[in-house]
Image (cartoon, rainbow, N blue to C red):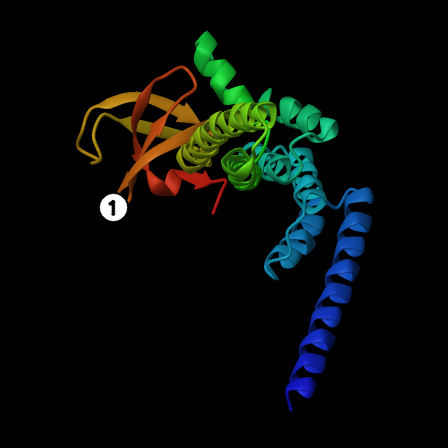
Amino acid sequence: MKQIVYIFIVLVSVGAMAQNNALFEQANALYNDGKYAESIDKYNAILETENHSAELYFNLANAHYKLNNIAPSIYFYEKALLLSPNDAEIKNNLAFANNMTIDAIDNIPEAGFSKLLNSIAHVMSFDSWAKIAVGLVFCFVVLFLIYYFAYATIKKRLAFIGSLTALFLLCVSLAFAFHKYNLVKNDKPAIVFEQECKVKSEPNSRSEESFRLHEGTKVQVLDTVKNWSKIKLSDGKTGWVSSGDIKMLSD
């Protein structure tokens, strides 16, 4: 019985994959014919099957860009970049899409030490830092056992120095692992989808308006209270917007 279930699941998966491939080809053909709205419908049909890829997001963003849909084009370029962060073509097209936005927001440069710390943490993922830490634990244990059971003075000294080095590197890797985890946990980017968004000083419609944002602007979500989201801009400004005015990039 289980084998029949497995075979059925495999057949359904293969069928869904074939259907998505057919939809993707149809969407690409519509895009090449200049039928951008129709191609968007096909791409969205693939997304509804929870099939995600950098290429799918990229093509969807291109279709929205051709229709001058500022917010959706930037949103899907950013989604594609999350899956393929080193893709030069995605970055280039995202830069063109960002040129269509109204808001000109300056970036506050990171401080020297903070920038260095973040750059090192971003070299690897949290899982990679954790795996290195596990490996260093093993090295420390082995070297300590060699030091404990060795009789030769030179071997004991080398094992002792090696175990201390492994312990030091273990602490460093753990520190970067947790720092990377916090960076990822606190990174909650979103794109403004409302044509003109009123940013309030407090999470209610009666509060004072601080400033306004326009579609396509990228923000960081700091907090959420009911249907309000506290956002932060790259220049350091903060405020509250209706959660319906923005769309989160990460689930």
Residue most extreme to the front: 151
Dot 1 surroundings within 10 Å: few (below 14), some, or many (20 or more)?
few
Q: Quadrant of residue 69?
A: top right
Front-most of 56 and 178? 178
Q: Is residue 208 left or right of residue 148?
A: left
What amino acid is labelled 1 in the image?
Lys
Front-most of 213 and 221? 221
Residue at (67, 26) in percent of width and height: 91
Residue most extreme to the bottom: 1
Q: Is residue 210 above or below residue 129?
A: above
**Can the viewer see residue 147?**
yes
Q: Is residue 20 above or below residue 170?
A: below
User: Residue 155 location in percent, x, y?
Assistant: 60, 27
Numbered circles on residues, count = 1
Residue at (69, 47) in percent of width and height: 56
The residue to which callout 1 is attached is 226
Front-most of 222 and 228? 222
Image quarter where the N terminus lies is: bottom right
User: Residue 35 location in percent, x, y?
Assistant: 75, 46
User: Residue 105 location in percent, x, y?
Assistant: 46, 15
Residue most extreme to the top: 112
Q: Is residue 219 above or below residue 243?
A: above
Q: Quadrant of residue 93?
A: top right
- Which SS class for mark 1? loop
Residue at (54, 20) in percent of width and height: 119
Q: Is residue 52 left or right of residue 240?
A: right
User: Residue 215 location in percent, x, y?
Assistant: 48, 30
**Can the viewer see residue 110?**
no
Residue at (43, 9) in percent of width and height: 111
